[in-house]
Image (tube, rainbow, N blue to C red):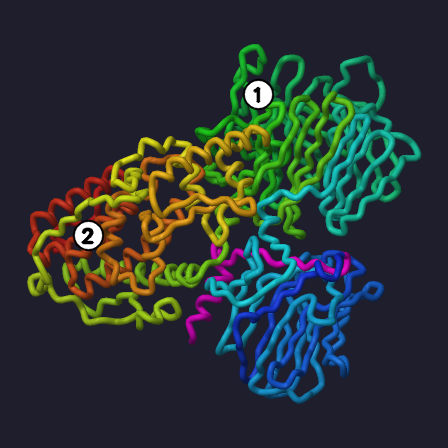
């Protein structure tokens, strides 16, 4: 089996590799010269024999859309086939045409089938031997009559606008693969800018004009629409109908998130409840929207709960029952199965609540819950809640309050998670994490992308103008990361609120941000973010040459090393090394990036028979160059006279320099992203001033060195370097991208031997960069360790092991190989010292003794 099948499997089944976003096409609603065209093999000449498939996922964004999906021209004989999309009543029609002659396939699909999913699979098969086409859409397959097809076939494949075919549907494509069992080209389409399209190995293949890269929609919250109300209003999302409702007592705005259509309906009779907060929930099975008020601070004897029929928009009084207590910013969730609505916490009358209430639709009554057992939740407000219907489990997250519930005592921010089982009535505390960042509170609604995580919008509510950010938390231990950019919110008034929704079907996160300047009139802003959301580092990490294939190889290499490690450990326990030793090494160094094989070598000789190449001790000299910046170990900068000028780089300058350097890509880091990472809580005008001052200081500091320049072009910052300048990070990237790392092994060991990357920097914005760097470097170092052991280059083995221990101090297999290398060089005493040091470190970290003895290895 060819190795690309393994690549393909890993690519689609490992989350870190399967990540792709897609390309959106500007269609018929744009001017002709603004419509999108994507030529897949614009930079390559390719051919296929026997058959080939064009396989991709397609999304049609709007109804009444038509045009050319793709066009395939045979370079050798100029025959052209195109796949054309049209609509007819409730049918989506896909026509495969031989251009200028006839229609070969007409596939009619029920529109509802495709509307059930935002993305659906399309595969067009060219069977060159049988002379037929097969078109598969979803699970329906259509075939053509036999025609004459060239074999081999030299396709020119174009999606969207092509020559005189100017009609393009408003569509998107992703997960594109083209090929057959012998050759397959895979295009993730996860670039975030530019016109060049790469395959999953990072090779340049295609060109696209007027692209809209969908990965940006997984990082940048997109403002979908804005609505205004001059009176108290509420808002909510209906995930079955894909509709957002923004209503007051007189009328309702309805925005369909899928079709982007908006309409306004005036009520024949106004809402019977006098709205104060307009808190609400949906009963999707009954298709009713419920609005409720818990308290009025003036004499009021009207209804407190009413429902709106979403089919005819008529109001019905549901209840006059009330809690008789203000509970601003309480948490809530709805049990659809039992038709019961739960609330917890809230603030009112100078106190915080720790009480659960439920409203039963059938009885129209509020009931205090006193039968919950287990952990106690302290009084709080500004909390968030979510509900897993399949397990009937609710979660309460965060907020602020105090143990006494009295406002005058002061408030504490909570970063904890509680689980409530509605069947057993048991409350379980999952975790309480130590928060080291600036204090934030969660917005309304936590949502669950899977069984292990939840998303929450968090923001500093104590600031008049602040930014909402999306957090993904682990349900198990509370570990988290920040994803996407931020959304501004005016949070000066108590009625300002934000709520998060997740539509699994559309693959979108929705944020409804409702702001008020006087607690009466309000503005609703609807934001959308494609799922899965990504971090700033992932946004700029689009394909580069060799990165993808190297990553795949490293995954395979890690698996093979794991297998070898298990085998060797078993032999060590038996105090002997019998049988062949398997080392994952390149079959051919020149083809290393393309193919690897598991080479079974002869077993290593017993320790006393190993012949060392040299017994000279390795001495690494720490010579610093002029015009150099060192980021591994201690941060060091040397000017053109080899003078240490590290003191010129303040913490902020180091931060900005490292961000620009590590976000180089093809065009640098955008000023917006830089500002967001370095000054997340500053307003735009203050950020611009701070950024300008910092950049000027950085330029001045870099002017002391030759061969380096900080440039700003088209809204982006980039570090330009030439041969006069040296940076160990840049050199590390060059070495680890080399086809033959072994040739530069000594230099890599020397470079990494200074210490970990940004060793003295503990800023969270660099955590993902550090993790990605180590994730890539460690497998390479382990592979080189295997190479050096096989080549009996034991001095290199010892040095490589020491470098690996900096990143992974408890790697047992590395210890075994280092001890064997030391014994081969007759460094028995040094080997014992190394073993004792490792065993001590193991005991300190693991809390137990290391399960091997020195004699087991020797």
- The circle drawn on residue 799 is 2
Report the side of 568 relative to 274 (left or right). Answer: left
Secondary structure state at the residue bearing disc 1: loop
In percent of width and height, residue 345 lies at 62, 24
Q: Residue at x 22, y 52 (%)?
A: 801
In percent of width and height, residue 331 lies at 64, 29
Quick one: 72 or 838, which is closer to the camera?
Answer: 72
Q: Residue furthest top?
A: 408
**224 vs 72: above or below:** above
Mark 1 or mark 2: whose residue is earlier in sequence: 1
Assess disc 2: are there few (<14), some (14-19) or many (≥20) residues with their C-alpha within 10 Å of its C-alpha: some
Q: Residue at x 26, y 67 (%)?
A: 582
Q: Residue at x 52, y 73 (%)?
A: 44
| 730 magenta-colored | no
Residue range corresponding to the magenta coloring: 1-29
Secondary structure state at the residue bearing disc 2: helix
- The circle drawn on residue 379 is 1
């Amino acid at each position: 089996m060819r190795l690309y099948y393994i690549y393909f499997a890993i690519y689609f089944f490992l989350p870190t590799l399967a990540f792709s976003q897609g390309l959106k096409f500007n269609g018929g609603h744009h001017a002709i010269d603004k419509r999108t065209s994507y030529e897949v093999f614009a930079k390559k000449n390719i051919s296929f024999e026997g058959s080939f498939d064009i396989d991709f996922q397609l999304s049609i964004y709007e109804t009444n859309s038509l045009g050319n999906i793709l066009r395939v021209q045979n370079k050798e004989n100029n025959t052209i086939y195109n796949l054309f999309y049209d609509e007819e009543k409730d049918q989506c029609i896909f026509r495969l045409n031989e251009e200028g002659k006839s229609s070969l396939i007409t596939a009619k699909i029920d529109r509802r089938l495709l509307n059930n999913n935002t993305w659906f699979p399309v595969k067009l098969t060219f069977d060159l031997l049988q002379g037929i086409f097969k078109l598969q859409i979803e699970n329906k397959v259509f075939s053509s009559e036999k025609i004459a097809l060239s074999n081999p076939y030299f396709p020119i494949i174009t999606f969207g606008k092509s020559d005189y075919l100017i009609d393009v549907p408003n569509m998107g494509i992703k997960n594109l693969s083209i090929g057959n069992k012998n050759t397959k080209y895979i295009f993730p389409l996860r670039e975030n800018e530019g016109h060049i399209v790469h395959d999953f190995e990072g090779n340049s293949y295609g060109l696209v004009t007027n692209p809209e890269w969908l990965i940006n929609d997984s990082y940048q919250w997109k403002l979908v629409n804005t609505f205004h109300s001059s009176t108290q209003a509420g808002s909510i999302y209906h995930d079955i109908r894909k509709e957002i409702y923004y209503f007051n007592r007189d009328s309702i705005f309805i925005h369909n998130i899928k079709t982007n259509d908006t309409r306004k309906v005036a009520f024949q009779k106004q809402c019977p409840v006098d709205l104060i907060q307009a808190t609400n929930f949906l009963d999707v099975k009954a298709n009713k929207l419920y609005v409720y008020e818990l308290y009025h601070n003036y004499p009021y004897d009207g209804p407190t709960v009413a429902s709106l029929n979403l089919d005819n928009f008529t109001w019905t009084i549901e209840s006059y029952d009330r809690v008789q207590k203000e509970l601003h910013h309480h948490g809530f969730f709805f049990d659809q199965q039992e038709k019961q609505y739960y609330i917890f916490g809230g603030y009112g009358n100078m106190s915080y609540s720790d009480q659960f209430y439920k409203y039963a639709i059938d009885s129209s009554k509020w009931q205090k819950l006193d039968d919950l057992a287990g952990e106690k939740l302290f009084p709080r407000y500004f909390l968030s809640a979510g509900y897993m219907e399949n397990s009937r489990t609710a979660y309460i997250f965060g907020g602020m309050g105090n143990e006494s519930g009295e406002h005058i005592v002061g408030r504490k921010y909570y970063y904890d998670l509680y689980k409530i089982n509605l069947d057993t009535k048991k409350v379980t505390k999952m975790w309480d994490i130590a928060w080291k960042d600036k204090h934030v509170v969660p917005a309304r609604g936590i949502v669950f992308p899977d069984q292990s995580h939840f998303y929450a919008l968090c923001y500093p509510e104590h600031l008049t103008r602040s930014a909402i950010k999306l957090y993904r938390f682990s349900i198990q231990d509370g570990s988290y990361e920040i994803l996407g950019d931020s959304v501004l919110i005016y949070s000066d008034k108590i009625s300002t609120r934000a709520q998060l929704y997740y539509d699994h079907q559309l693959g979108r996160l929705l944020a409804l941000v409702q702001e008020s300047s006087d607690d009466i009139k309000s503005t609703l802003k609807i934001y959308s973010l494609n799922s899965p959301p990504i971090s700033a580092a992932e946004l700029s990490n689009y394909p580069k040459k060799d990165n993808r294939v190297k990553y795949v190889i490293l995954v395979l290499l890690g698996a093979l090393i794991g297998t070898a490690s298990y085998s060797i450990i078993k032999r060590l326990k038996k105090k002997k090394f019998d049988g062949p030793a398997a080392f994952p090494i390149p079959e051919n160094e020149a083809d290393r990036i393309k193919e690897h094989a598991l080479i079974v070598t002869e077993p290593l000789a017993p320790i006393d028979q190993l012949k060392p190449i040299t017994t000279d001790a390795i001495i690494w000299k720490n010579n610093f160059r002029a015009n150099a910046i060192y980021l591994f170990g201690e941060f060091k900068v040397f000017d053109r006279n080899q003078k240490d000028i590290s003191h010129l780089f303040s913490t902020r300058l180091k931060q900005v320099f490292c961000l620009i350097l590590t976000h180089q890509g093809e065009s640098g880091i955008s000023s917006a992203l830089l500002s967001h990472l370095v000054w997340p809580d500053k307003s735009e005008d203050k950020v611009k001033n701070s950024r300008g001052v910092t950049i000027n200081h950085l330029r001045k500091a870099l002017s002391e060195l030759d061969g380096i320049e900080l440039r700003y072009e088209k809204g982006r910052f980039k570090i330009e370097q030439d041969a006069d300048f040296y940076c160990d990070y840049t050199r590390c990237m060059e070495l680890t991208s080399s086809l033959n790392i072994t040739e530069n092994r000594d230099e890599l060991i020397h470079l990494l031997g200074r210490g970990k990357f940004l060793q003295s920097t503990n800023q969270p914005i660099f955590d993902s960069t550090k993790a990605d760097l180590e994730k890539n470097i460690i497998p390479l170092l382990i592979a080189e360790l295997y190479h050096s052991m096989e080549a009996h280059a034991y001095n290199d083995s010892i040095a490589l092991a020491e470098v690996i221990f900096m990143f992974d101090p408890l790697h047992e297999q590395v210890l075994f190989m280092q001890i064997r290398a030391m014994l081969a060089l007759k460094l028995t005493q040094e080997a014992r010292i190394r073993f004792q040091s490792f065993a001590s470190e193991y005991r300190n970290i693991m809390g137990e003794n290391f399960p091997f003895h020195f004699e087991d290895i020797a």
